[in-house]
Image (tube, helix red, strand yellow):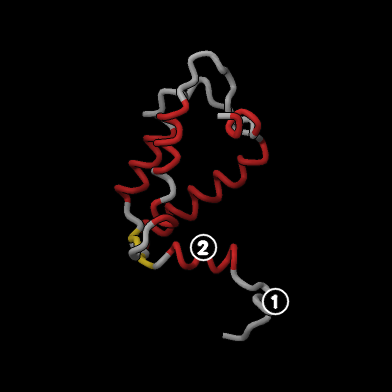
Amino acid sequence: TDAWRDAGFVGRERGFDYQPQLDAMRLLYPPMRSREPFRFSAEFITEANDAIALGNQNRYKLDLPPDWLFVNRLQYGLHSVLALLGATADWRGIFHQAVYGPTEGFLSQES
């Protein structure tokens, strides 16, 4: 709970329910958590959007820190395009390689 507060996501502490917020956030990250290839779909986008926005019981108590606004829009935009394409991949492996893998020469490698 301290991490949520410290990051600036809790706008109104009174009545903020941390467990449903964590559950909603987990719905955003199956592509990066799945050990199997994940296929982006319109259903996934709808479910994730509903959990974070309309179906989120904390929606009037949650703040989106300015630093997260860009990340949030980028994520929703990218996920929406991937859903339109029906993109399927080992997103967990791609994510781990990008975050934890060696970066030397990463941008200069020829395809």
Residue for point 43% across, 45% down: 28
Determine the CA span between mark 1 and mark 2. 17 Å
> Which of 62/43 is in front?
62
93 on left or right of 97: left
- 80, above or below 95, in the image: above
The residue singled out by tag 2 in the image is: 95
Residue 56: x and y in percent read 41, 28
Query: Residue 58 location in percent, x, y?
Result: 46, 23
Task: Indicate the quadrant containing the N terminus: top left, top right, bottom left or bottom right.
Answer: top right
Q: Residue at x 61, y 28 (%)?
A: 5
Total labels drawn: 2
Amino acid carrying label 2: it is: Phe
Tags 1 and 2 touching, CB below 8 Å: no
Q: Position of residue 21 (x, y in %)?
A: 45, 31
Q: Which quadrant of the figure contains the C terminus?
A: bottom right
Q: Which disc, if any, is residue 104?
A: 1
**Residue under the image location 59 percent in, 22 percent down:** 11
- Where residue 72 sits, quadrant-wise, is top right
